[in-house]
Image (cartoon, helix red, strand yellow):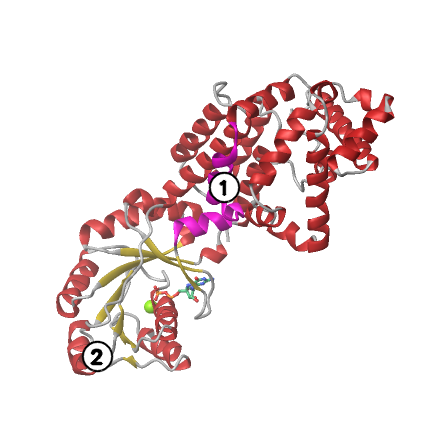
Amino acid sequence: MLDKLSSTLKKATDKIANAVFLDKKLVDSIVKDLQRALLEADVNVSLVLNITSKIKKTALDERISGIEKKEHLIKLLHDELKSILGETKDIELSPTKQNTIMMLGLYGAGKTTTISKLALYYSKRGKKVCAIGLDVHRPAASEQLKQLCDKLKIPAFISPDLKDPVKIYEKFAPQLKEYDLVLIDTAGRDALDKSLIDEIKSISKTAKPTETLLVMPADIGQTAKKQAQTFKSAVSITGVIITRMDSTAKAGGALTACAETKVPVVFIGTGEKPHDLELFNPESFLSRLLGMGDLESLMQKIHSVTDSSALEKTQKNLEAGKLTLKDVQQQLESMESLGSMDKILSMVPGLGKAKEKISSEQLSAQQQKMKNYKHAINSMTPYEIENPEVLEKETSRMSRIAKGSGTSTTDIRNLIKQYKMLNEMIKSQSTMAEGNLDQKTMMKLAKKFGRKKFRM
Ligand code: GDP
Ligand code: MG
């Protein structure tokens, strides 16, 4: 389901998070990837251009820098995508009154199949559900409904001999009263014509549905906009169900088209089987596309602990191709105020999996290492911090620091070694082709430094 879009979005957020410099070349390549993936998912061109131009503008905005810019960008991408996915709507079934959901849609949209899915969905949630077949146009329509429902042990009321949907409804009306939820299957047409509108209106007048849901297959892409608009103005609909999300790359078109028409998508169909139905929630759908953990809470925490002036200085040093031990100290301190490594790993998007591979011993060893580094730096004089090379020349300094900080000279040697490597890398990075870091090197070094990934 939108796998390609998902992997491109994940790559884009990774690129943003991992880049030390977001230079024009890198931003251009991210924007280009995004545009291609969104267009392939059939998202409207003007929506795509709108999103990507905002991203570009923020990325190249010189007034924002460093971590703040990455946060801005990822949040911007997230919010823009969320807004094109529309509003959340939950169908809340009344516990006291009877609920009736009427399905509408053209031929083959997936109405009957979706009725069986909804029947399963709500009966699993403790509701007494039944279905009624009012598709009088296709000879086998009511049989199809009955068969699907029989398999799920859901009562389906059908009357193949009657040709008037309103009469069928009235015939079963007394029996329907026993159910918490009645699902009404209706007939489709090739297009929304007068006969369909009249039929829907007369069924609606009699059955008084609490929800009227338009069913559309995802593979119609952006055409969904026109269809939703036409149905919305002809008969009132309270929501949409998009089916066949599993069998098309164009689902982005159908989803965003509904948002544009301001009709909420309530469910999505993700296969032919009765359990292939999901509640549609733009936020969680997007989290899945972006492969995110709890991004918001991480961002909030970063905001609350980040000393922005110190960060700016670090950023300046980075841009000048120089990282000082002071910067390292600052980084380690903000890591600590963020909480344990373990917690951080589970919050960072995309690191959920990495976390599983790290044992808790490894984690606490990393944490200890970071603590040692921090204590060691705290025991250094400002002169030593500015000129760490003197430590290697004068081993007495190293012993003094080790003693004073409760660490070993090996710890300090490692710290200096890794600090140097990191500095080397940052220097060479500015000459790198894409302006993007050699991520493998970065990961390796950052890992040695006690951080799994040098991101955000
Ligand atoms: P109706 O004419 O609107 O009642 O459409 P049907 O319910 O008869 O469905 C038409 C076809 O779409 C059937 O072959 C269904 O199996 C198929 N279908 C419905 N929903 C989905 C879905 O979410 N995924 C897939 N792959 N097929 C679906
Ligand atoms: Mg049908």
Task: Look at discs 1 and 2 and give the one toward the viewer.
Answer: 2
Q: Image point 18% across, 56% down: which residue?
A: 194
The quadrant of the rendering that contains the C terminus is top right
Counting from the top left corner in percent of width and height, residue 421 is at 77, 28
Q: Amino acid at mark 1?
A: Glu
Can the viewer see residue 249? Answer: no
Query: Which residue is the site of mark 2?
Result: 176
In this picture, residue 168 sits left or right of residue 438: left
Find residue 306 and name its label.
none
The local crowd at label 2, few if under 14, some if 14 to 19, many if 20 or more residues have their Cα within 10 Å, is many
Counting from the top left corner in percent of width and height, residue 50 is at 40, 30
Q: Residue 76: name its quadrant.
A: top left
The reply to whether callout 1 and callout 2 are in contact (CB within 8 Å) is no
Q: Of helix, strand and loop, which one carries label 2?
A: helix
The local crowd at label 1, few if under 14, some if 14 to 19, many if 20 or more residues have their Cα within 10 Å, is some
Which residues fall within the magenta stretch? 281-307
Can the viewer see residue 110? Answer: yes
In this picture, residue 300 sits left or right of residue 340: left
Query: Which residue is the site of mark 1?
Result: 40
Is 301 within the magenta? yes
Q: Which tag, 1 or 2, sits closer to the chain's start?
A: 1
Q: Residue 101: name its quadrant.
A: bottom left
Q: Image point 49% across, 40% down: which residue?
A: 301
Considering the whole magenta stretch, tell me its main secondary structure.
Answer: helix
Counting from the top left corner in percent of width and height, residue 181 is at 26, 73
